[in-house]
Amino acid sequence: MNRNVRPSVFALLLVGVAGGLLSGLFGIGGGTIIVPALALWLGMPQKLSAGTSVAAILPTAVVGAVSYVVQGHYDLIAALCLAVGIVAGAQLGAHLLAKLPTGTIQWGFMVFLAIVIVSLWFVVPSRDDSLELNPLLVALLVVTGFITGILSGVLGVGGGVVVVPVLMFFFGANDLEAKGTSLLMMIPGSISATLGNIRRQNVDLRAAVFVGLAACVCVPFGTLLAAWIDPFWGNVAFSLYLVFIL
C-alpha cells in the first residue's frame, strides 16, 4: 500500500473492535492483532503498521487499565517499575524500527510470538497468587520493562504479550493482576514510543484514531470476560490466538 492510500473507516473500526476485545481479555495492547491486520489485510507498510499500532494502543491501554483498576486487579509499584524501563526501551525500539529492514521486523515478530506461545504452557496461574516485591525483583522489573519497550517500539505491540506471562511465571502474579499491571505499564511506554515514531514519520494518525476509539469502546467487555474465564482456559485461549496470528 502506498502511504497516500487510506484504508476505509469501517475496516479500521473492525480492527479496533478486535484489538479492544483482545486487549481487555488478555491484558495486551492489541498490537498482535492490529499490526497483522493493518499490514496484511489493509495493505499498510510494515513499519507504518507498527508505528500506527503503538499510537492506537495508548487510549486502549488507558481504558483497559482503568477497567482492571476498578476491579482491584493491579500492582501499582510493579507497573511503575516496568514503566521506567519501557519508556527508555521504547525510544530505542522506535529508533531501530526506522533502521531495520522490513523482513527482519516480520521475522522478529514471528519468533517473538513463538516464544510467548511456548511460555504460556508453562504458566498456569492461580487467582490466589499475588506479587511480593523485594529490591531484586524491582530491579528485574525495570530490566523487563526496558526489553519490553524495545519490542514495543520495533514490533508495534504494547508489550503485554511479554509482560503478562513474565509476571505470572517469574514474579508470581495471578492472571488478572498481571493483566491489569501490564495495561498500566503500557500507558507511558505507548506515549514514549508514539512520540518517537511520529518524529520518524512512522505513524498514520488518522488510522490510529479510528482504531484506538473502537478499541476503547470494546476493551471493558474484554476485561469482564477475563474475570469470568478460568485462568487455565484463559491461557489456552491466549496461546491459540497467538498461534493463529503466527
Image (cartoon, rainbow, N blue to C red):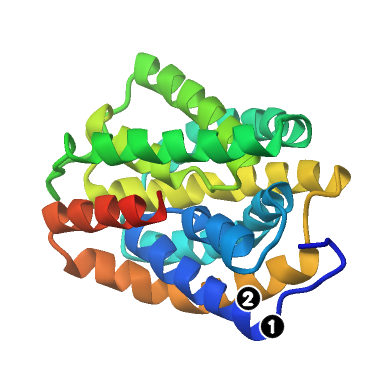
Residue 43 visible? The answer is yes
Residue 175 x/y as whole percent: 24, 49
How packed mark 2 is, by other alpha carbons closer than 10 Å (few <14, some 14-19, many 20 or more), is many
- According to the picture, the residue beneath numbered tag 2 turns out to be 12
Circle number at residue 19: none
User: Can you tell which quarter of the image residue 72 is in?
Assistant: bottom left
Q: Is residue 35 above or below residue 104?
A: below
Q: What element does badge 2 sit on?
A: helix
Total numbered circles: 2
Q: Check contact, mark 1 vs mark 2: CB within 8 A.
A: yes
Name the one closer to the observer, 162 or 115: 115
Above or below for 183 versus 148? below
User: Would residue 83 be visible to someone looking at this image?
Assistant: no
Residue 87, by quadrant, is top right
Residue type, mark 1 in image: Val
* Residue drawn at x 78%, y 36% as measured from the top left: 98
The location of residue 52, given as percent across then percent down, is 70, 57
Q: Quadrant of the N terminus?
A: bottom right
Q: Residue furthest bottom?
A: 10
For badge 2, the amino acid type reads Leu
Badge 1: residue crowd in 10 Å (few <14, some 14–19, many ≥20): few
Left or right of residue 229, residue 110 in this image: right
Please tell me which residue lies in front, 5 or 216. Answer: 5
Q: Nearer the viewer, residue 185 or 36?
A: 36
Q: Secondary structure at mark 1?
A: helix
Task: Name, please, the residue furthest toward the top.
Answer: 136
Residue 184 x/y as whole percent: 49, 50
Residue sitting at x 26%, y 50%? 239
Report which residue position mark 1 lands on: 9
Q: How far is mark 1 from mark 2, CA to CA?
A: 5 Å
The spot of residue 131 in percent (x, y) is 27, 35
Q: Which residue is at 23% across, 58% downward?
A: 237
